[in-house]
Amino acid sequence: RWPSKRLAIMNDLCRHGIHRVTLVIVVCVLCIGASAWNSQAQTLKSIDVETFETWMQNLSNWGRWGDDDQLGTLNLITPEKRREALTLPRDGELVSLAHDVETEPAIDNTRPFEMTMSGLGDAGLSVSDQWTVSYHGYAHTHLDALCHFSYDGQLYNGVPADSITVEGCAKLAITNFKEGIVTRGVLIDIPYHRNVEFLEPGSPIYPEELDNWETQTGITIGSGDAVFIRTGRWKRRAVEGPWDIGSHVAGLHASTARWFHNRDVAVIGTDHGADVHPSGMDGERHPLHILLLVAMGTPIFDNVDLEALSRTTTERQQWEFLLTAAPSPVPGGTGSPLNPIAIF
């Protein structure tokens, strides 16, 4: 399964009568280039505290949209950005990015979704159900609010972490995203890029690979985009069963935060919890979460299911789409389960 640009190069060479031996050499070079990304991405780079502190300072969006900003990088989704995104769909095909709720206990689902039915057997004409869900973690598709993580006693934009009480988040709660997210979504399908079914646990993704993806696809990530990174987590789970994702999973190295910052990405989504585990930083399991939520004010979609999206984008060779998503407006909430929709 060759990326489209490599196939285009081969076809051009054949049309222009390049000698067979020369073509074989070129093909080998292209293959070696792909393999180089595979092996390079397997080595975990360590992060020391001084480097992390520098990233926290240099990537900070504190004050960028005012001292009382509650939206963070969602400010980048302007009315013009929404109007542009609305022109993307061609035939109206819909793809859900939510994973069906997991009701069975597993090593990656220690707090299963519960549903209790009521009204069964009653004389009335209706039945109802009650849900119980603890959605943060590695099982349920959800959106993190900006008050979900703190660092050194502070939330995004310098809001004191102790402003969070038993009543919830006084600022930066999920209610700030009540109007929803409508923008251009882009899938960066790393297993497709590496020509594998899924990434093996512990495999980090670096900024250089994201650069290479842009080169291969011809798509440039821009201001206000929602970027989804597929590792193939749900595919691997279906094939090999659940595993301890909190300790060992493929994902984004914290150094990718600068890549997203430089492109003014509005929101990030992955098929687990974004950070590669192990993270490469002693004493901190979620350095990317902290950089995104606390320094940059960038909300995160966790545990989105990108398998159907991967099939659709591969078939179409189209990596961009209209994204719509809206959380439940829970006052003081640290996030919300939701069902993001891609429209082609």
Image: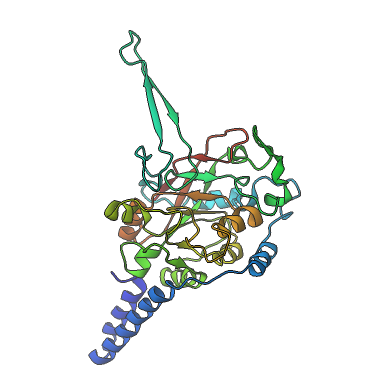
Q: Relative to residue 59, is residue 265 drawn left or right?
A: left
Colouring method of the image: rainbow
Where is residue 240 drawn, in percent x and y? Answer: 28, 55
Q: Residue furthest right?
A: 67
Quadrant in the picture for the N terminus: bottom left
Question: Is residue 196 toward the left or the right of residue 265 in the image?
Answer: left
Residue 154, percent from left and from top? 70, 50
Question: Residue at position x 44%, y 69% from top?
Answer: 213
Q: Residue furthest front?
A: 283
Q: In this view, does 41 lie above or below 221?
A: below
**Residue in view at x 38 percent, y 52 percent:** 306
Question: Residue at 43% across / 43% down in the picture?
Answer: 140
Q: In this view, does 256 lie to the left or right of 16?
A: right
Q: In this view, does 31 lie to the left or right of 326?
A: left
Q: Which of 230 and 177 is in front in this view?
A: 230
Residue under the image location 67 percent in, 69 percent down = 50
Q: How many marks?
A: 0
Question: Whole-percent x and y of residue 168?
Answer: 63, 35
Pick whichever, 79 or 45, lies toward us: 45
Q: Which of 69 and 286 is in front in this view?
A: 286
The answer to which of 121 and 75 lies nearer the viewer is 121
Residue 261, position as x, y percentages in the image: 60, 62
Residue lying at the far top in this picture: please name it.
Answer: 123
- Image quadrant of residue 96? top left
